[in-house]
Image (cartoon, rainbow, N blue to C red):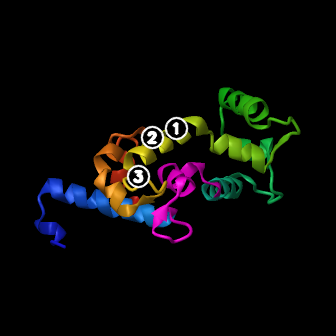
Amino acid sequence: MKDVHTLSPNRKSDLEIIKHTASKFREADHNNDKSLDKAEYHAMIYPMDSEVEHEKAVVETLQKYDTDHDGFISYTEYRGKDNATAEEVQTMYEEFHHDYDSNRDGKIDRSEIRDWVMPGDKPAAEGEADHLIAETDANGDKKLSYAEIIDKHKLWVGSMATGHGAHLHDGGEL
């Protein structure tokens, strides 16, 4: 492969997209068969929809708020330090009791945390996944190979599933 420093800016961008896509592909290929089935593909495009990512988000939220380590977030823990204005306290009270504590037991449990930090639009995500698989799956095996994705990378760059390419340019995962 040509040295990245000698490539034109457009070629560097393409190479970065390819590297990023390869990284995302490997991460999503849970069974290591070098192809993505529909569930793996969905996890690649919408990592925040995956159960693994949901659990990570719940754990991170508990680590941040659950100061007594009982596995729940109380209103006191949610509210945090006492330097909030009266208006902020009222807003936090309403959020906690009306938005997040859906079973009204006075604490936010793991399921409620998931709903709070991982709101999603699963039907839209599934529709986009179906569309991209149909357009990308050249051999019709209902799985996407790395080569198939690269061959259709312009489609992916224009997709809402990739934030119109923004997710493909995120260098944090390279």
Q: Residue at x 10, y 67 (%)?
A: 6
Q: To which residue does mark 2 refer?
A: 131
The residue type indicated by label 1 comes to Gly
Closer to us: 160 or 150 = 150
The residue type indicated by label 2 comes to His
| Residue 6 in the image: above or below residue 135 | below
Label 3 sits on a secondary structure element that is loop
Q: CA distance from mark 3 to mark 2?
A: 10 Å
| Figure quadrant of residue 90 | top right
The residue type indicated by label 3 comes to Asp
* Label 3–label 2 contact, CB within 8 A: no
- With 174 as the anchor, is 41 left or right in this view? right
Circle 1 or circle 3, nearest the eye: 3
**Disc number for residue 137:** 3
User: Which tag, 3 or 2, sits closer to the chain's start?
Assistant: 2
**Disc number for residue 127:** 1
Instruction: Give coordinates of residue 80: x percent, y percent.
Output: 71, 45
Instruction: Give coordinates of residue 15: x percent, y percent.
Output: 24, 61
Label 1 sits on a secondary structure element that is helix
